[in-house]
Amino acid sequence: MIRASFALIRRDLGLSLTRGGGPLLSVGFYLTLMAMIPLSLGPDQAVLSRIAAGLTWLCLALSSLLSLERLFERDYEDAVFDTLRLGPLPLELIALLKCLSQWLGTGVILSLMTPVVMIILGAPMSLALMGLVSAFLGSLSFALIGGIGASLALGSRKGGVLMALLVLPFYVPPVIFGAGLMQAVQTGASPLQALAFLSAYALFALALGPVAMGAALRSALS
Amino acid sequence: MGVSLRVEGLSLKKGYNLLIHNLNFTLKSGEAISLYGENGVGKTTLLRTLAGFLTPFAGAISAYENDVHIEPEIWQGRRIHFLGHHDALSPSRTVAQELKFHADYLGGAVAGIEMLNLTPLLDLETRYLSAGQKRRLSCAKLLMAKRSLWLLDEPMAPLDVDHRALLSGLMQAHLAAGGMIIAAVHDPLPFATRILKLERPTAKEREAASV
């Protein structure tokens, strides 16, 4: 079972790097969005450094949406699920591993970009480091909640828009907690509370995600 | 004794349409069934139901090993191979990568490369393969992980004459080793099998099931 899990993660990571719509697309989208912010708001350093943290979270959420459509769709179209379902892993675990490899391939890279982007926008160093930690937790929640949306929209043609509508409301809590965390750091308050909420939401997604995805996939695949 | 599969009173629906009504058969170790029937009669649906992908409308499918019932999860996860007419391959991965993945995922060792003449194809991405080459690649997983029941959906269709003979040799070896095969076919297999011809349910049966 462990061997099968690693085989699946290796395969999905390899696929996300080689086929289109992988991390490059999301990272490119993320960087372009961030580059447009100073262009649209003007180069005033004081304004930018104040709103950098909040905007980073918004862009992170939107970039995480991009690669969702491909999470299950390709394997569904190529009938790869026929093989996956006859292996030793239950459908819930397959879905979880796919989400985690998606996170490793895209979310983690986006998180690593986050402090860089924040510094470019003029945020102080301490804030950027906190941004890295919170972006890790946030992108994990985005990947898992997004996986639920992706599995629900599976099989409907052009499910991308439907998926965005399903998923975005559930992206709100991490955005609130993440931006709140940034604000706490900026105003010198304790960041612990926001950090705890952010972790709690990631754990909530980790617990609910596999069960929900398993049920949705089972109905989409029958 | 070995393994056996028992299908009792199986009825299958696709949407509201009754496809198969009250199907009963028992398959024992070393036996093969050729599944005949016109297009759209439900051969693929039956195979997918036996693989556990679809839930039957009525009836039961149960597997036994030495008369002890095998849990459906174990049966589906460790004892069945399913070869659909859609080869389950990712177009952007190479043949070698797919072989390695199937071996690791299904719990076996990479095998059958020589036997299925896959050596010259190893570095090609699977989207460049012809239908017959894809089928040969899919057949490799039959050899890599040892499983009791092979569910084959028109396994011979894209293969050339030599490879048809090769695959039927593999199937006979599997039966001789105590395996079971259910294959949907249009041309008879070149060895003795039991024959199951699927018929469309009568209007009366269809009406009874639509309530």
Image (cartoon, coloured by chain):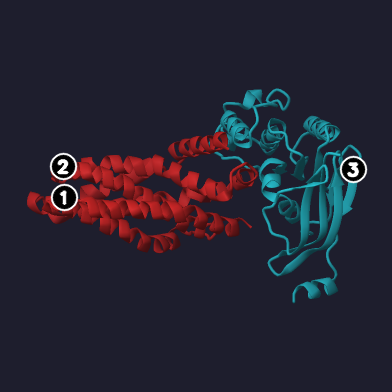
| Residue at image coords 86%, 53% | B25
Q: Secondary structure at mark 1?
A: helix
Badge 3 vs badge 1, beta-carbon distance below 8 Å: no
Q: Is residue B103 above or below residue A76?
A: above
Estimate the spatial distance between the alpha carbons at disc 3 and disc 1, rounded to whole Å.
74 Å
The mark closer to the camera, 3 or 1, is 1
Q: Nearer the viewer, residue A104 or A130?
A: A130
Position in image of residue B191 (x %, y %): 90, 37
Mark 2 touches mark 1? (CB < 8 Å)? yes
Dot 3: chain letter: B
Q: Nearer the viewer, residue A35 or A45?
A: A45
Residue at image mark 2: A126
Pointer 3 residue: B193
Which chain letter goes with mark 1?
A
Q: Which chain did the image draw in red?
A: A
Mark number displayed over residue A185: 1
Residue B155 visible in the current orientation: no
Give the color of chain B as drawn.
cyan
In which quadrant will I find the C terminus of chain B?
Answer: bottom right
